[in-house]
Image (cartoon, helix red, strand yellow):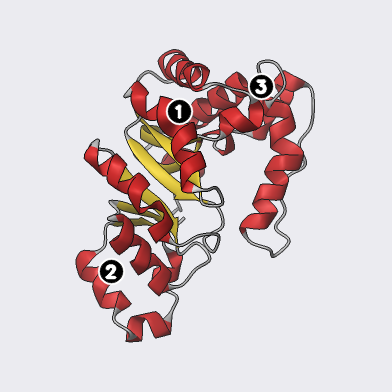
Amino acid sequence: MERPTLAYYRSLPKGDLHNHCLLGGRRSVIEKFTGRRMAPFRSGGCGIADLNAWIVSELRPLIQLPGGFEKGVEAAFLQALHDGVTRLEMSIDVTLGALSGIPATRIIGVLQQAHVTVAPGIVFLPEMGFPRTRSLRSLLAAAEPFFSSGYFRAIDLYDDEEAQSPAAFRELYRLAGSLGMKRKAHAGEFGTAESVREAVEVLELDAVQHGIGAAGSAEGCAAGSCTFFASNAPQIFPV
């Protein structure tokens, strides 16, 4: 029996429920537009710190060029379309304005335009992304125009899992819940089963991004975490 090809899998309708917008497209699309090359990402064994360093040194300078942000968003929708995605839950960082001088109104407009012109057949649920390394007050201030727009359907918490405990973001998640937004968070990407359980309980999550640590800790399972995940956990996306 022949193994299905990549083209076969791409032809199947599917959902992409864990996508970071500016990291979700092919480098070649942005490189062709800007005329600059990005070095491929290489892990140095330092976890999320390696990815953050690559973003700062390789991706951000191109996104900050005229038209670079628009092309990065377009690349993400093009990739989703190419992969046969029919439902796309994709986040954009709320601190992008402060880091790159791109206001919320422009971010929303670019997302809307790219969706309509590149992949109108995809069901798109935009998400607000929150880095765990920033204070709650600064995140709430940055997120205010995103919340008030009524455009976003979910929130996601990511970056260094050890930067702050889930409890530091309880107010943010209660706000999102009161607005009927889907509540996601990265947990167990590098942490333990207990860290995943804490995030689920404290933030009242609807979905866990990664969650790999939920299955990788014998100590956590012995403490009852595996039973908890089997009976009470939200969706876990181990990617």
Residue position for label 3: 68
The relative height of residue 231 versus residue 186 in the rendered view (above or below) is below
Instruction: Residue 83: tell me if it is visible.
Output: no
Quick check: 17 above or below 49?
above
**Mark 1 vs 3: CB contact within 8 A:** no
Quarter where residue 238 is shown? bottom left
Query: Would residue 85 be found to the left or right of residue 206 on screen?
Result: right
Residue 81, label in figure: 1
Q: CA distance from mark 1 to mark 2?
A: 33 Å
Toward the viewer: 145 or 113?
145
Residue 124 location in percent, x, y? 36, 28
Residue plotted at (27% across, 57% down): 234
First of labels 3, 2 by sequence position: 3
Question: Mark 3: few, some, or many residues within 10 Å (few <14, many ≥20)?
Answer: some
Residue at 54% from the left image edge and 64% from the top image edge: 162
Report the amino acid beneath label 3.
Answer: Gly
Report, in whole angstroms, how far the alpha carbon at label 1 lies from the one at label 3: 20 Å
Residue at the spot 59% in from the left edge and 22% down from the top edge: 102
Badge 2 marks a residue whose secondary structure is helix
Which amino acid type corresponds to the residue marked 1 in the rendered image? Leu
Distance in Å between CA atoms under marks 3 and 2:
41 Å
Residue 45: percent from left, percent from top = 69, 65
> In terms of sequence position, does the residue under pointer 1 or pointer 2 come before the other?
1
Location of mark 2 (residue): 229
Mark 1 touches mark 2? (CB < 8 Å): no
Q: Position of residue 205 (x, y in %)?
A: 30, 54
| Label 3 close to label 2 by CB (< 8 Å) | no
